[in-house]
Amino acid sequence: MRQYWTVLFYCGFNIAVARSGFTVVDLEGHSHSLSHYSGKWVVVNFWATWCSTCVAEIPDFVAFHRAHYPKDAIVLGMDLDDEASDVEIRAFAKRHRMNYPLVRPTTEVLQVLGPVTGVPTTYLIDPNGYIAGHQVGPVTRSEIEGFIDQYQYISKK
């Protein structure tokens, strides 16, 4: 299993985002706040419709969200496609059966999580509101679940 995660937990650089947090509104008009998901993992995936790697990882995010929401995790898809309208993004999401909330990232999101240097980029925020790690490049459901299992095991020690 390939693991490219930049793991902030292991390095002692856990960054609390719960206090500053962010609130976003998805394409359906529903509000999503990090504080609302306290006690759950939040998987934040920055993607774009024109990114073939992003499109290839969608089925894994769909499967992860289906398996974990609402009990212990949620996926938030942060669409970076400036040229696509909300209508086009909704149609794209329907074609790809995206079952998780899709939002346009705000300046607030980027200030909290940091710059996105490439797509796809995925951040994992732990149930206590800390950035546990992030990865630039594709991820799979099993890699996310493996990271979470390992993080929880190490944080209990």
Image (cartoon, grey):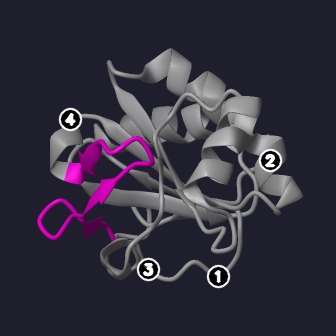
Q: Residue 12 vs residue 101: left or right?
A: left
What residue lies at 28% left-to-right and 37% top-to-bottom? 156
Q: Residue at x 80, y 47 (%)?
A: 55
The quarter of the rendered structure image containing the C terminus is top left
Q: Which mark is residue 117?
A: 1
Indicate left or right for 146 with 71 as reference.
Answer: right
Residue in the foreground of this view, choosing between 96 and 6: 96
Q: Amino acid at mark 1?
A: Thr
Q: Which residue is mark 4?
A: 39
Q: Which mark is residue 43?
A: none
Determine if the magenta segment contains residue 19.
yes
Q: CA distance from mark 3 to mark 4?
A: 22 Å
Q: Write down the quadrant of residue 60 in the picture.
A: top right
How many angstroms separate mark 2 from mark 3 (CA)? 23 Å
- Nearest to N terminus: mark 1 or mark 4: 4
Q: Residues within 10 Å of mark 3 (few under 14, many from 20)?
A: few
Provide the residue designation for mark 2: 55
**Label 2, residues with CA under 10 Å away: few <14, some 14-19, many ≥20:** some
Marks 4 and 2, how far apart in space?
A: 29 Å
Task: Kindly report the distance in space between the C-alpha atoms of the residues bearing marks 2 and 1.
Answer: 18 Å
Q: Type of residue at label 4?
A: Gly
Q: Look at the numbered disc 3 and give the secondary structure of its residue.
A: loop
> Dot 1, crowdedness within 10 Å: few (<14), some or many (≥20)?
few
Q: CA distance from mark 1 to mark 4?
A: 28 Å
- Confirm whether residue 68 shows in the render: yes
Q: Which residue is mark 3?
A: 114
Is residue 122 among the parts visible in the rendering? no
Q: Nearer the viewer, mark 4 or mark 2?
A: 2
Q: Quadrant of the N terminus?
A: top right
Whichever of callouts 2 and 3 sits on the residue coming sooner in the sequence is 2
